[in-house]
Image (cartoon, rainbow, N blue to C red):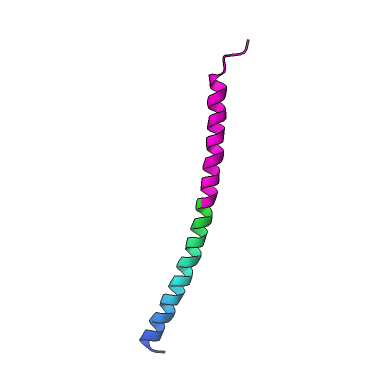
Amino acid sequence: MTQTTENGIDLAATVVALTAEAAQLQTRIIALREELVALNEQMKAISAALQQPPSR
């Protein structure tokens, strides 16, 4: 196998690995965004509860 062919195989393997990693990162980004939305909703609920006058 020539050096050019070996480099081509290495390049292809690198592209495949980076593509897989990018997909995993994209999935994690989506999950984090969903968690942030949920956290924001919880913060809104807490803020609204704090605005209520104390019950007696």
Give the prevailing secondary structure in the magenta stretch. Answer: helix
56 with respect to 23 (left or right): right
Which one is nearer the viewer's eye here, 35 or 51?
A: 51
**Residue 49 to residue 54: above or below:** below
Q: Residue at x 52, y 36 (%)?
A: 40
50 with respect to 8 (left or right): right
52 with respect to 12 (left or right): right
Which one is nearer the viewer's eye here, 17 or 52?
A: 52
**From the image, which quarter does the N terminus lie in?**
bottom left
Is residue 22 found inside the magenta-colored segment of the image? no
**From the image, which quarter does the C terminus lie in?**
top right
Q: Residue at x 53, y 31 (%)?
A: 43
**Image quadrant of residue 39?**
top right
Q: Residue at x 54, y 30 (%)?
A: 44
Q: Residue at x 54, y 21 (%)?
A: 50
Q: How many marks?
A: 0
Q: Looking at the picture, how far across and down is residue 22, in whole percent?
A: 47, 61
Q: Looking at the picture, how far across and down is residue 8, in whole percent?
A: 41, 81
**Residue 25 to residue 13: above or below:** above
**Image quadrant of residue 49?**
top right
Extreme residue in the bottom direction: 1
**Residue 1 to residue 39: above or below:** below
**Residue 2 to residue 39: above or below:** below
First to last magenta residue range: 30-56
Is residue 50 found inside the magenta-colored segment of the image? yes
